[in-house]
């Protein structure tokens, strides 16, 4: 997979005041966790926003701190100011070369389902999957071809075709995507409403 680079800057003041000052200066406070002691850094907000339109756990990043110390990391968590649309803090996790890790990868549907063309309802149940692999083998996405899905068909995790270097950790019987009949959906919905009405009547009688 493609590896991105990011410049990091050591920070020694860890309280809220200095962190707020960094943000006003256009930097994001961050911490690199891993097999060594945590490394407290900041990254440039403009550089981060331009390189990471979306933040995911499966993007391998090479951070060079103060132009010297290099860390190969993944984003494990982040905090965001929703009103301003700004990332306010990032937790990075340092990976070890040659050692497997666990992360999440988005699931992308490809192709056109003939069942949908016939009026079926496409249901995308699993938008992300948990995987285990070496850092170099992390895929950007897992693609699922739905071009053979007719009404009533489904694709389970055990049906997915992924590299032998990647282990999917979710249960094999979990449904990733399915195409159901809209008529079936209506029938189920009506049955649920009848059950709710019966329950309400019983409670009223009591």
Image (cartoon, helix red, strand yellow):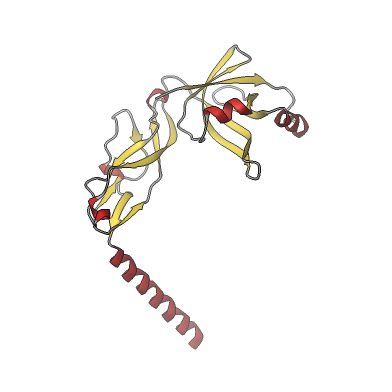
Position in image of residue 10 (x %, y %): 67, 20
Q: Quadrant of residue 119?
A: bottom left
Return the x and y of residue 86 as percentages of the image width and height. 63, 37
In the image, what residue occupies the spot 57% across and 22% down? 36
Can residue 206 be seen here? Answer: no
Residue furthest out toward the top:
68
Instruction: Tell me which corner region of the image, top left, top right, bottom left or bottom right, holds residue 120.
Output: bottom left
At which x and y percent is residue 71? 54, 19
Where, by quadrant of the figure, is residue 32 drawn? top right
The residue lying at 75 percent from left, 25 percent from top is 13
- Kindly give the residue lying farthest to the right in the view shown: 17
Location of residue 186 in the rendering, given as x and y in whole percent from the top left corner: 33, 69
Q: Nearer the viewer, residue 178 or 159?
A: 178
Q: Is residue 26 above or below residue 66?
A: below
**Could you say which is closer to the camera, residue 187 or residue 137?**
187
Q: Residue furthest front?
A: 117
Picture mark count: 0
Q: Is residue 148 found left or right of 199 in the rendered image? A: left
Q: Is residue 22 visible?
A: yes
Q: Is the N terminus in the top left, top right, bottom left or bottom right quadrant?
A: top left
Up-down relation of residue 12 to residue 86 (above or below):
above
Q: Is residue 202 above or below residue 44?
A: below
């Amino acid at each position: 997979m493609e590896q991105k680079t990011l410049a990091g800057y050591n920070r020694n003041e860890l309280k809220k005041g200095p962190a707020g000052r960094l943000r006003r200066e256009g930097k994001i406070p961050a911490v690199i966790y891993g097999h060594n002691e945590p490394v407290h850094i900041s990254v440039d907000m403009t550089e981060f926003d331009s390189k990471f339109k979306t933040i995911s756990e499966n993007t391998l990043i090479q951070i060079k701190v103060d132009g010297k110390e290099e860390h190969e990391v993944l984003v494990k968590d982040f905090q965001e100011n929703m009103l301003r649309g700004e990332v306010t803090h990032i937790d990075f996790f340092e990976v070890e070369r040659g050692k497997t890790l666990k992360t999440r990868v988005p699931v992308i549907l490809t192709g056109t389902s003939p069942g949908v063309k016939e009026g079926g309802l496409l249901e995308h149940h699993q938008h992300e999957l948990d995987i285990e692999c070496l850092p170099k083998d992390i895929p950007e996405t897992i693609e699922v071809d739905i071009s053979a899905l007719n009404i009533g068909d489904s694709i389970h995790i055990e049906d997915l075709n992924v590299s032998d270097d990647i282990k999917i950790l979710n249960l094999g019987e979990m449904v990733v995507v399915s195409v159901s009949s809209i008529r079936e959906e209506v029938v189920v919905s009506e049955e649920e409403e009848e059950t709710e009405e019966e329950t309400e009547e019983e409670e009223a009688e009591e």
